[in-house]
Amino acid sequence: MVVSVENEDEEFYSDKGGKAMGMQDAINELYERREKARQMGGKKQVDMQHARGRMTARERINYLLDPDSFWEIGLLNRSDLPEMYEKTAADGRICGVGKIHDRRVAVVTEDRTILGGSGGRVGNEKTRDMHVMAVKGGYPIISLGDELGGIRLPDHMGSDGMSQARPRQELLLTPRQTPRIAAIMGECFGAPSWIASQSDFVVMVKGTAMGAAGPRILKMAIGQDITPQELAGWELRFHETGEVDAIAENDEECLNIIREYLTYMPQNNSMEPPALPVIDDPYRRIENVDKLVPDALNRGYDMHRLIKAIVDDGRYFPIKDGFGKSLITCLARIAGRVVGVIANNPMYNAGAPDVSACEKVTSFICLCDSFNIPLIFLSDIPGLFPGQESERQKLPGKIMVWHEARALASVPKISITIRKGYGMGWNCMLSPGEGGDFVVAWPTASISFVDSEIGIEIVHGAKISQAKDAEAEKERLRKEWAISSAPWAAAERNFLQDVIDPRETRKFLAEALDIIRGERGSIISEHKLQTWPTVF
Protein backbone atom coordinates (compact mmCIF):
# COMPACT_ATOMS: atom_id res chain seq x y z
CA MET A 1 0.00 0.00 0.00
CA VAL A 2 1.27 3.49 -0.88
CA VAL A 3 0.55 5.99 1.86
CA SER A 4 0.32 9.75 1.26
CA VAL A 5 0.20 12.15 4.16
CA GLU A 6 -2.08 15.21 3.82
CA ASN A 7 -1.71 16.48 7.35
CA GLU A 8 0.97 14.64 9.22
CA ASP A 9 -0.21 16.07 12.52
CA GLU A 10 -3.74 14.70 12.28
CA GLU A 11 -4.49 12.03 9.69
CA PHE A 12 -3.34 9.92 6.74
CA TYR A 13 -4.91 8.48 3.58
CA SER A 14 -4.62 5.24 1.66
CA ASP A 15 -4.00 4.94 -2.10
CA LYS A 16 -7.64 3.90 -2.52
CA GLY A 17 -8.67 7.44 -1.90
CA GLY A 18 -10.57 6.58 1.25
CA LYS A 19 -9.85 8.37 4.45
CA ALA A 20 -8.16 6.10 6.99
CA MET A 21 -8.30 6.44 10.76
CA GLY A 22 -6.03 9.00 12.38
CA MET A 23 -2.81 7.99 14.07
CA GLN A 24 -4.28 8.31 17.53
CA ASP A 25 -7.29 6.21 16.54
CA ALA A 26 -4.97 3.50 15.23
CA ILE A 27 -2.94 3.58 18.43
CA ASN A 28 -6.13 3.40 20.47
CA GLU A 29 -7.22 0.35 18.50
CA LEU A 30 -3.84 -1.28 19.11
CA TYR A 31 -4.25 -0.92 22.87
CA GLU A 32 -7.85 -2.10 22.72
CA ARG A 33 -6.80 -5.23 20.87
CA ARG A 34 -3.98 -5.86 23.32
CA GLU A 35 -6.27 -5.44 26.30
CA LYS A 36 -8.88 -7.75 24.77
CA ALA A 37 -6.23 -10.41 24.22
CA ARG A 38 -5.07 -10.11 27.83
CA GLN A 39 -8.59 -10.95 29.01
CA MET A 40 -7.89 -14.49 27.73
CA GLY A 41 -11.08 -16.57 27.62
CA GLY A 42 -13.11 -14.03 29.55
CA LYS A 43 -14.22 -13.65 33.15
CA LYS A 44 -16.27 -16.87 33.26
CA GLN A 45 -13.36 -19.00 32.11
CA VAL A 46 -10.93 -17.19 34.40
CA ASP A 47 -13.25 -17.78 37.36
CA MET A 48 -13.46 -21.48 36.48
CA GLN A 49 -9.65 -21.69 36.44
CA HIS A 50 -9.48 -20.05 39.87
CA ALA A 51 -12.18 -22.43 41.14
CA ARG A 52 -9.86 -25.32 40.27
CA GLY A 53 -7.34 -23.79 42.66
CA ARG A 54 -5.03 -22.81 39.82
CA MET A 55 -3.55 -19.62 38.46
CA THR A 56 -4.31 -18.41 34.97
CA ALA A 57 -1.55 -18.57 32.38
CA ARG A 58 -0.78 -14.87 32.72
CA GLU A 59 -0.75 -15.03 36.51
CA ARG A 60 1.76 -17.87 36.30
CA ILE A 61 4.05 -15.85 34.06
CA ASN A 62 3.86 -12.84 36.38
CA TYR A 63 4.69 -15.02 39.39
CA LEU A 64 7.51 -16.90 37.67
CA LEU A 65 9.41 -14.00 36.13
CA ASP A 66 11.21 -11.04 37.64
CA PRO A 67 8.82 -8.05 37.91
CA ASP A 68 8.19 -6.11 34.69
CA SER A 69 10.59 -8.28 32.67
CA PHE A 70 8.12 -10.08 30.35
CA TRP A 71 8.22 -9.15 26.66
CA GLU A 72 5.36 -10.96 24.93
CA ILE A 73 5.51 -12.26 21.38
CA GLY A 74 2.34 -12.96 19.40
CA LEU A 75 -0.13 -11.27 21.75
CA LEU A 76 -2.38 -10.35 18.82
CA ASN A 77 -2.47 -13.86 17.36
CA ARG A 78 -5.86 -15.42 16.59
CA SER A 79 -6.97 -18.66 15.02
CA ASP A 80 -6.95 -18.61 11.22
CA LEU A 81 -10.37 -20.30 11.21
CA PRO A 82 -13.08 -17.58 10.98
CA GLU A 83 -15.46 -19.42 13.30
CA MET A 84 -12.74 -19.60 15.98
CA TYR A 85 -11.57 -15.99 15.70
CA GLU A 86 -13.44 -14.47 18.65
CA LYS A 87 -12.69 -17.43 20.95
CA THR A 88 -8.92 -17.56 20.52
CA ALA A 89 -7.07 -14.70 22.18
CA ALA A 90 -3.33 -15.16 21.45
CA ASP A 91 -4.52 -18.45 19.95
CA GLY A 92 -4.31 -20.11 23.36
CA ARG A 93 -0.53 -19.76 23.67
CA ILE A 94 1.26 -17.05 25.62
CA CYS A 95 4.89 -16.81 24.54
CA GLY A 96 7.67 -14.39 25.28
CA VAL A 97 10.98 -13.61 26.88
CA GLY A 98 11.61 -12.45 30.44
CA LYS A 99 14.10 -12.78 33.25
CA ILE A 100 14.58 -14.99 36.31
CA HIS A 101 17.24 -13.85 38.78
CA ASP A 102 18.08 -11.21 36.17
CA ARG A 103 18.96 -13.92 33.60
CA ARG A 104 17.02 -14.18 30.35
CA VAL A 105 14.57 -17.05 29.77
CA ALA A 106 11.92 -17.90 27.18
CA VAL A 107 8.44 -18.92 28.33
CA VAL A 108 5.65 -20.81 26.54
CA THR A 109 2.39 -21.12 28.45
CA GLU A 110 -0.81 -22.91 27.51
CA ASP A 111 -3.95 -20.94 28.32
CA ARG A 112 -6.58 -23.27 29.77
CA THR A 113 -9.24 -20.54 29.45
CA ILE A 114 -8.99 -20.70 25.63
CA LEU A 115 -10.82 -23.82 24.41
CA GLY A 116 -9.35 -25.93 27.22
CA GLY A 117 -5.80 -24.97 26.28
CA SER A 118 -6.02 -26.92 23.03
CA GLY A 119 -3.32 -26.34 20.44
CA GLY A 120 -4.23 -24.51 17.25
CA ARG A 121 -2.15 -23.96 14.13
CA VAL A 122 -1.19 -20.35 14.80
CA GLY A 123 -0.32 -20.93 18.44
CA ASN A 124 1.74 -23.98 17.57
CA GLU A 125 3.74 -22.05 14.99
CA LYS A 126 4.36 -19.31 17.56
CA THR A 127 5.61 -21.95 19.99
CA ARG A 128 8.03 -23.34 17.42
CA ASP A 129 9.33 -19.83 16.74
CA MET A 130 9.86 -19.33 20.48
CA HIS A 131 11.98 -22.48 20.73
CA VAL A 132 14.11 -21.39 17.78
CA MET A 133 14.61 -17.96 19.33
CA ALA A 134 15.68 -19.44 22.67
CA VAL A 135 18.23 -21.79 21.10
CA LYS A 136 19.66 -19.03 18.90
CA GLY A 137 19.74 -16.61 21.82
CA GLY A 138 21.30 -19.20 24.12
CA TYR A 139 18.92 -19.08 27.08
CA PRO A 140 16.61 -21.59 28.84
CA ILE A 141 13.07 -22.26 27.68
CA ILE A 142 10.26 -22.98 30.11
CA SER A 143 7.00 -24.67 29.07
CA LEU A 144 4.02 -24.38 31.43
CA GLY A 145 1.53 -27.08 30.46
CA ASP A 146 -2.21 -26.90 31.17
CA GLU A 147 -3.98 -28.44 28.19
CA LEU A 148 -7.12 -30.43 28.85
CA GLY A 149 -8.22 -30.50 25.24
CA GLY A 150 -5.08 -31.79 23.56
CA ILE A 151 -4.85 -30.95 19.89
CA ARG A 152 -7.54 -28.56 18.57
CA LEU A 153 -9.41 -30.84 16.22
CA PRO A 154 -10.97 -28.27 13.83
CA ASP A 155 -7.47 -26.91 13.10
CA HIS A 156 -6.07 -30.31 12.24
CA MET A 157 -8.81 -32.19 10.43
CA GLY A 158 -8.07 -33.61 6.99
CA SER A 159 -4.75 -34.38 5.39
CA ASP A 160 -3.69 -30.75 5.15
CA GLY A 161 -4.60 -30.02 8.77
CA MET A 162 -2.92 -33.16 10.06
CA SER A 163 0.20 -32.38 8.05
CA GLN A 164 0.63 -29.31 10.25
CA ALA A 165 0.21 -31.25 13.52
CA ARG A 166 3.85 -32.30 13.59
CA PRO A 167 6.15 -32.54 16.61
CA ARG A 168 8.39 -29.56 17.23
CA GLN A 169 11.29 -30.52 15.02
CA GLU A 170 13.45 -27.78 16.49
CA LEU A 171 13.43 -29.60 19.82
CA LEU A 172 14.58 -32.81 18.18
CA LEU A 173 17.42 -31.14 16.31
CA THR A 174 18.80 -29.05 19.19
CA PRO A 175 19.07 -31.38 22.20
CA ARG A 176 20.48 -30.02 25.44
CA GLN A 177 21.92 -26.83 23.96
CA THR A 178 19.89 -24.72 26.36
CA PRO A 179 18.15 -26.02 29.52
CA ARG A 180 14.55 -27.05 28.90
CA ILE A 181 12.11 -27.02 31.77
CA ALA A 182 8.54 -28.30 31.65
CA ALA A 183 5.78 -27.90 34.22
CA ILE A 184 2.63 -30.00 34.26
CA MET A 185 0.00 -27.77 35.88
CA GLY A 186 -3.24 -29.38 34.72
CA GLU A 187 -4.67 -32.53 33.13
CA CYS A 188 -2.25 -32.63 30.21
CA PHE A 189 -2.65 -35.13 27.40
CA GLY A 190 -0.84 -34.92 24.09
CA ALA A 191 1.46 -31.96 23.38
CA PRO A 192 2.49 -31.11 26.99
CA SER A 193 3.52 -34.74 27.47
CA TRP A 194 5.69 -34.64 24.36
CA ILE A 195 7.34 -31.43 25.58
CA ALA A 196 7.92 -32.87 29.06
CA SER A 197 9.45 -36.02 27.60
CA GLN A 198 11.98 -33.88 25.72
CA SER A 199 12.82 -31.64 28.67
CA ASP A 200 15.81 -31.71 30.98
CA PHE A 201 13.71 -31.04 34.07
CA VAL A 202 10.02 -31.71 34.70
CA VAL A 203 7.98 -30.57 37.70
CA MET A 204 4.39 -31.67 38.23
CA VAL A 205 1.69 -30.28 40.51
CA LYS A 206 -0.13 -32.80 42.70
CA GLY A 207 -3.56 -33.65 41.37
CA THR A 208 -2.54 -33.19 37.74
CA ALA A 209 -1.95 -35.79 35.03
CA MET A 210 0.34 -36.26 32.05
CA GLY A 211 -0.27 -38.81 29.32
CA ALA A 212 -0.31 -39.63 25.64
CA ALA A 213 -4.11 -39.82 25.34
CA GLY A 214 -6.85 -38.71 27.70
CA PRO A 215 -9.67 -40.71 29.31
CA ARG A 216 -12.30 -39.47 26.83
CA ILE A 217 -10.38 -40.75 23.83
CA LEU A 218 -9.59 -44.03 25.58
CA LYS A 219 -13.24 -44.63 26.38
CA MET A 220 -14.27 -44.05 22.79
CA ALA A 221 -11.32 -45.87 21.20
CA ILE A 222 -10.81 -48.93 23.41
CA GLY A 223 -13.69 -48.80 25.87
CA GLN A 224 -11.46 -48.11 28.87
CA ASP A 225 -13.26 -46.03 31.51
CA ILE A 226 -10.64 -44.43 33.76
CA THR A 227 -9.95 -41.16 35.58
CA PRO A 228 -7.00 -38.90 34.68
CA GLN A 229 -5.28 -39.74 37.98
CA GLU A 230 -5.72 -43.48 37.54
CA LEU A 231 -4.45 -43.24 33.99
CA ALA A 232 -1.46 -40.92 34.28
CA GLY A 233 -1.46 -39.09 37.59
CA TRP A 234 1.46 -37.49 39.42
CA GLU A 235 2.11 -40.51 41.64
CA LEU A 236 2.63 -42.76 38.62
CA ARG A 237 5.02 -40.30 36.95
CA PHE A 238 6.99 -39.43 40.11
CA HIS A 239 7.24 -42.79 41.86
CA GLU A 240 6.83 -45.45 39.14
CA THR A 241 8.02 -44.17 35.76
CA GLY A 242 10.49 -41.49 36.87
CA GLU A 243 9.44 -39.13 34.08
CA VAL A 244 8.96 -36.31 36.59
CA ASP A 245 11.89 -34.83 38.52
CA ALA A 246 10.02 -32.90 41.22
CA ILE A 247 6.53 -32.59 42.69
CA ALA A 248 4.78 -29.42 43.90
CA GLU A 249 1.78 -28.97 46.16
CA ASN A 250 0.37 -26.08 44.10
CA ASP A 251 1.09 -23.63 41.29
CA GLU A 252 3.14 -21.29 43.45
CA GLU A 253 5.45 -24.04 44.70
CA CYS A 254 5.82 -25.38 41.16
CA LEU A 255 7.01 -22.01 39.87
CA ASN A 256 9.31 -21.54 42.88
CA ILE A 257 10.91 -24.92 42.12
CA ILE A 258 11.61 -23.80 38.56
CA ARG A 259 13.22 -20.60 39.79
CA GLU A 260 15.42 -22.56 42.20
CA TYR A 261 16.40 -25.16 39.58
CA LEU A 262 17.63 -22.43 37.27
CA THR A 263 20.10 -21.23 39.92
CA TYR A 264 22.01 -24.47 39.25
CA MET A 265 21.85 -24.25 35.46
CA PRO A 266 23.95 -22.29 32.95
CA GLN A 267 22.23 -20.23 30.27
CA ASN A 268 23.44 -22.73 27.67
CA ASN A 269 25.96 -25.52 27.22
CA SER A 270 28.81 -23.17 26.30
CA MET A 271 28.78 -21.73 29.82
CA GLU A 272 29.30 -22.97 33.35
CA PRO A 273 26.51 -22.80 35.93
CA PRO A 274 26.60 -19.57 37.93
CA ALA A 275 28.99 -19.53 40.88
CA LEU A 276 27.89 -17.95 44.16
CA PRO A 277 29.99 -16.08 46.69
CA VAL A 278 31.56 -18.51 49.18
CA ILE A 279 30.15 -18.03 52.67
CA ASP A 280 30.41 -21.58 54.02
CA ASP A 281 34.12 -22.35 54.64
CA PRO A 282 35.25 -24.86 51.95
CA TYR A 283 37.66 -26.38 54.50
CA ARG A 284 35.00 -26.83 57.16
CA ARG A 285 35.43 -30.14 58.98
CA ILE A 286 32.49 -32.51 59.45
CA GLU A 287 33.00 -33.15 63.14
CA ASN A 288 29.85 -35.25 63.63
CA VAL A 289 30.60 -37.68 60.81
CA ASP A 290 30.65 -40.65 63.21
CA LYS A 291 27.00 -39.89 64.03
CA LEU A 292 26.02 -39.65 60.36
CA VAL A 293 27.58 -42.93 59.17
CA PRO A 294 27.58 -45.99 61.46
CA ASP A 295 30.65 -48.23 61.67
CA ALA A 296 28.67 -51.46 61.36
CA LEU A 297 28.39 -52.45 57.71
CA ASN A 298 24.94 -53.96 58.21
CA ARG A 299 23.38 -50.82 59.69
CA GLY A 300 21.37 -48.51 57.46
CA TYR A 301 21.55 -44.72 57.50
CA ASP A 302 20.19 -41.82 55.47
CA MET A 303 22.80 -40.60 52.98
CA HIS A 304 20.88 -37.32 52.62
CA ARG A 305 22.24 -36.29 56.04
CA LEU A 306 25.84 -36.81 54.93
CA ILE A 307 25.27 -34.88 51.69
CA LYS A 308 23.80 -32.02 53.70
CA ALA A 309 26.90 -31.97 55.91
CA ILE A 310 29.26 -31.89 52.91
CA VAL A 311 27.73 -29.30 50.59
CA ASP A 312 27.62 -25.50 50.93
CA ASP A 313 25.22 -24.33 53.64
CA GLY A 314 23.55 -27.75 53.73
CA ARG A 315 21.54 -26.90 50.60
CA TYR A 316 20.95 -29.29 47.73
CA PHE A 317 18.35 -29.80 45.02
CA PRO A 318 17.05 -33.41 44.64
CA ILE A 319 16.35 -34.79 41.17
CA LYS A 320 13.83 -37.67 40.85
CA ASP A 321 13.76 -38.08 44.63
CA GLY A 322 10.64 -40.27 44.47
CA PHE A 323 12.07 -42.74 41.94
CA GLY A 324 14.86 -45.32 42.32
CA LYS A 325 15.27 -44.37 45.98
CA SER A 326 18.31 -46.55 46.62
CA LEU A 327 20.30 -43.96 44.68
CA ILE A 328 20.31 -40.20 45.34
CA THR A 329 20.88 -37.72 42.52
CA CYS A 330 21.00 -34.05 43.40
CA LEU A 331 22.52 -30.69 42.50
CA ALA A 332 24.48 -28.77 45.13
CA ARG A 333 27.49 -26.47 45.53
CA ILE A 334 31.01 -26.97 46.81
CA ALA A 335 32.98 -23.74 47.37
CA GLY A 336 30.26 -21.82 45.52
CA ARG A 337 30.36 -23.93 42.33
CA VAL A 338 27.65 -26.32 41.17
CA VAL A 339 28.25 -30.07 41.40
CA GLY A 340 26.10 -33.11 40.70
CA VAL A 341 26.04 -35.69 43.49
CA ILE A 342 25.35 -39.40 42.92
CA ALA A 343 25.12 -41.35 46.17
CA ASN A 344 23.87 -44.72 47.36
CA ASN A 345 21.24 -44.54 50.08
CA PRO A 346 21.44 -47.54 52.45
CA MET A 347 17.95 -46.74 53.73
CA TYR A 348 16.55 -48.39 50.58
CA ASN A 349 17.60 -51.85 49.34
CA ALA A 350 20.73 -51.36 51.49
CA GLY A 351 21.84 -48.91 48.78
CA ALA A 352 21.75 -51.49 45.97
CA PRO A 353 20.50 -49.84 42.75
CA ASP A 354 17.61 -51.51 40.92
CA VAL A 355 16.52 -50.92 37.33
CA SER A 356 14.78 -47.67 38.26
CA ALA A 357 17.93 -46.36 39.94
CA CYS A 358 20.01 -47.29 36.87
CA GLU A 359 17.70 -45.26 34.62
CA LYS A 360 17.72 -42.37 37.07
CA VAL A 361 21.51 -42.12 37.35
CA THR A 362 22.03 -42.41 33.58
CA SER A 363 19.62 -39.54 33.00
CA PHE A 364 21.40 -37.46 35.66
CA ILE A 365 24.85 -38.10 34.18
CA CYS A 366 23.55 -36.92 30.78
CA LEU A 367 22.16 -33.76 32.37
CA CYS A 368 25.36 -32.88 34.23
CA ASP A 369 27.68 -33.63 31.33
CA SER A 370 25.54 -31.59 28.94
CA PHE A 371 25.60 -28.51 31.18
CA ASN A 372 29.18 -28.64 32.49
CA ILE A 373 28.46 -29.85 36.02
CA PRO A 374 31.22 -31.94 37.74
CA LEU A 375 30.10 -35.29 39.16
CA ILE A 376 30.75 -36.53 42.69
CA PHE A 377 30.09 -40.20 43.52
CA LEU A 378 29.55 -41.16 47.18
CA SER A 379 29.72 -44.93 47.23
CA ASP A 380 28.20 -47.26 49.81
CA ILE A 381 27.03 -50.05 47.59
CA PRO A 382 26.58 -53.75 48.44
CA GLY A 383 26.13 -54.59 44.76
CA LEU A 384 23.23 -54.21 42.34
CA PHE A 385 19.69 -55.32 43.17
CA PRO A 386 19.21 -58.72 41.49
CA GLY A 387 16.21 -61.00 41.14
CA GLN A 388 13.65 -62.23 38.67
CA GLU A 389 11.86 -58.89 38.34
CA SER A 390 15.13 -57.06 37.71
CA GLU A 391 16.04 -59.51 34.97
CA ARG A 392 12.64 -59.08 33.38
CA GLN A 393 13.34 -55.34 33.28
CA LYS A 394 16.69 -55.83 31.50
CA LEU A 395 19.00 -55.16 34.46
CA PRO A 396 22.24 -56.12 32.61
CA GLY A 397 21.47 -53.69 29.79
CA LYS A 398 20.53 -50.91 32.20
CA ILE A 399 23.81 -51.40 34.09
CA MET A 400 25.86 -51.16 30.92
CA VAL A 401 23.99 -48.07 29.71
CA TRP A 402 24.94 -46.48 33.04
CA HIS A 403 28.57 -47.49 32.43
CA GLU A 404 28.53 -46.13 28.89
CA ALA A 405 27.08 -42.78 29.95
CA ARG A 406 29.58 -42.42 32.77
CA ALA A 407 32.48 -43.31 30.46
CA LEU A 408 31.39 -40.75 27.85
CA ALA A 409 30.90 -37.99 30.40
CA SER A 410 33.80 -35.54 30.08
CA VAL A 411 33.11 -33.35 33.10
CA PRO A 412 35.33 -33.86 36.18
CA LYS A 413 34.46 -37.04 38.08
CA ILE A 414 35.39 -37.70 41.70
CA SER A 415 34.59 -40.85 43.68
CA ILE A 416 34.69 -41.43 47.43
CA THR A 417 33.99 -44.91 48.83
CA ILE A 418 32.29 -44.21 52.15
CA ARG A 419 31.66 -47.73 53.38
CA LYS A 420 30.80 -50.66 51.09
CA GLY A 421 32.23 -51.06 47.60
CA TYR A 422 31.26 -54.48 46.27
CA GLY A 423 31.32 -56.08 42.85
CA MET A 424 29.88 -54.55 39.70
CA GLY A 425 28.05 -52.04 41.84
CA TRP A 426 31.35 -50.47 42.91
CA ASN A 427 32.40 -50.31 39.25
CA CYS A 428 29.19 -48.40 38.50
CA MET A 429 30.02 -45.90 41.24
CA LEU A 430 33.37 -45.02 39.62
CA SER A 431 35.90 -47.50 40.95
CA PRO A 432 39.63 -47.36 39.98
CA GLY A 433 40.24 -47.58 36.24
CA GLU A 434 36.77 -46.20 35.38
CA GLY A 435 37.91 -42.76 34.25
CA GLY A 436 37.73 -40.83 37.51
CA ASP A 437 39.90 -37.75 38.08
CA PHE A 438 40.16 -38.63 41.77
CA VAL A 439 39.19 -41.99 43.30
CA VAL A 440 39.62 -42.21 47.07
CA ALA A 441 38.10 -43.93 50.09
CA TRP A 442 37.40 -43.43 53.76
CA PRO A 443 39.40 -45.67 56.13
CA THR A 444 36.08 -47.35 56.99
CA ALA A 445 35.69 -48.64 53.43
CA SER A 446 35.20 -52.34 52.79
CA ILE A 447 36.05 -53.23 49.19
CA SER A 448 35.63 -56.68 47.69
CA PHE A 449 33.75 -58.68 45.11
CA VAL A 450 30.90 -59.54 47.52
CA ASP A 451 29.88 -59.02 51.11
CA SER A 452 31.94 -61.09 53.55
CA GLU A 453 29.03 -63.27 54.70
CA ILE A 454 28.21 -64.27 51.14
CA GLY A 455 31.84 -64.56 50.04
CA ILE A 456 32.90 -66.72 52.97
CA GLU A 457 30.10 -69.21 52.29
CA ILE A 458 30.88 -69.36 48.57
CA VAL A 459 34.66 -69.62 48.90
CA HIS A 460 35.06 -71.44 52.20
CA GLY A 461 31.74 -73.22 52.73
CA ALA A 462 33.20 -76.71 52.56
CA LYS A 463 36.10 -75.78 54.83
CA ILE A 464 33.75 -74.35 57.44
CA SER A 465 31.49 -77.40 57.40
CA GLN A 466 34.50 -79.69 58.02
CA ALA A 467 35.96 -77.60 60.87
CA LYS A 468 35.75 -78.87 64.45
CA ASP A 469 34.28 -75.52 65.51
CA ALA A 470 32.43 -74.15 62.48
CA GLU A 471 31.50 -70.85 64.11
CA ALA A 472 35.06 -70.18 65.30
CA GLU A 473 36.38 -70.95 61.82
CA LYS A 474 33.81 -68.61 60.28
CA GLU A 475 34.82 -65.82 62.70
CA ARG A 476 38.48 -66.32 61.81
CA LEU A 477 37.65 -66.06 58.13
CA ARG A 478 35.58 -62.92 58.75
CA LYS A 479 38.59 -61.20 60.31
CA GLU A 480 40.81 -62.22 57.40
CA TRP A 481 38.21 -61.00 54.95
CA ALA A 482 37.89 -57.65 56.75
CA ILE A 483 41.66 -57.14 56.63
CA SER A 484 41.89 -57.92 52.93
CA SER A 485 38.84 -55.71 52.15
CA ALA A 486 40.25 -52.63 53.89
CA PRO A 487 41.34 -49.84 51.50
CA TRP A 488 45.06 -50.01 52.39
CA ALA A 489 46.16 -52.54 49.76
CA ALA A 490 44.38 -50.65 46.98
CA ALA A 491 45.97 -47.38 48.14
CA GLU A 492 49.46 -48.98 48.33
CA ARG A 493 49.22 -50.08 44.71
CA ASN A 494 47.86 -46.68 43.55
CA PHE A 495 44.45 -48.02 42.62
CA LEU A 496 43.10 -45.55 45.15
CA GLN A 497 44.83 -42.20 45.06
CA ASP A 498 44.32 -41.66 48.75
CA VAL A 499 42.50 -42.67 51.89
CA ILE A 500 41.03 -39.51 53.41
CA ASP A 501 39.92 -38.47 56.88
CA PRO A 502 36.09 -38.59 56.77
CA ARG A 503 35.97 -35.29 58.66
CA GLU A 504 37.88 -33.62 55.81
CA THR A 505 35.62 -34.85 53.00
CA ARG A 506 34.38 -31.34 52.20
CA LYS A 507 37.94 -29.95 52.18
CA PHE A 508 39.10 -32.79 49.92
CA LEU A 509 36.33 -32.13 47.40
CA ALA A 510 36.95 -28.38 47.34
CA GLU A 511 40.66 -28.88 46.72
CA ALA A 512 40.17 -31.68 44.18
CA LEU A 513 37.75 -29.59 42.13
CA ASP A 514 40.11 -26.64 42.23
CA ILE A 515 43.04 -28.80 41.10
CA ILE A 516 41.03 -30.21 38.19
CA ARG A 517 39.98 -26.72 37.16
CA GLY A 518 43.63 -25.64 37.16
CA GLU A 519 44.36 -22.52 35.17
CA ARG A 520 41.68 -23.10 32.54
CA GLY A 521 39.28 -20.79 34.29
CA SER A 522 36.23 -22.86 33.35
CA ILE A 523 35.11 -26.45 32.92
CA ILE A 524 33.25 -27.11 29.67
CA SER A 525 32.28 -30.65 28.69
CA GLU A 526 32.77 -32.18 25.25
CA HIS A 527 28.97 -32.77 25.34
CA LYS A 528 29.11 -36.32 24.04
CA LEU A 529 25.88 -37.08 25.90
CA GLN A 530 23.76 -34.16 24.74
CA THR A 531 22.04 -36.26 22.06
CA TRP A 532 21.08 -39.10 24.42
CA PRO A 533 17.32 -39.48 24.90
CA THR A 534 15.80 -37.67 27.85
CA VAL A 535 13.57 -40.68 28.52
CA PHE A 536 14.63 -44.29 27.85
Image (spheres, grey):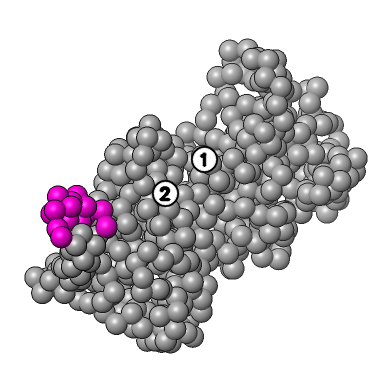
Whole-percent x and y of residue 11? 84, 46
Is 462 within the magenta?
yes
Camera sees residue 146? no
At horizontal 63% and vertical 43% (from top left) the residue drawn is 234
Question: Mark 1 Cα within 10 Å, few/some/many (few <14, many 20+)?
Answer: some
271 is higher (above) or lower (below) than 127: below
The amino acid type found where label 2 is placed reads: Ala
Q: Which of the marked residues, 2 or 1, is nearer the chain's N terminus?
A: 1
Characterize the local packing of mark 2: few (<14), some (14-19) or many (20 or more) Cα atoms within 10 angstroms: many
| Stretch of the chain drawn in magenta | 453-468
SS class of the residue under badge 2?
Answer: helix
For the C terminus, the image quarter is: top left
Q: Quadrant of residue 290?
A: bottom left
Residue tagged by mark 2? Answer: 357
Which mark identifies residue 241? 1
Look at label 1 and name its amino acid.
Answer: Thr
Q: Residue at x 55, y 46 (%)?
A: 239
> Where residue 218 appears, x then y in whole percent?
66, 20
Q: Secondary structure at mark 1?
A: helix
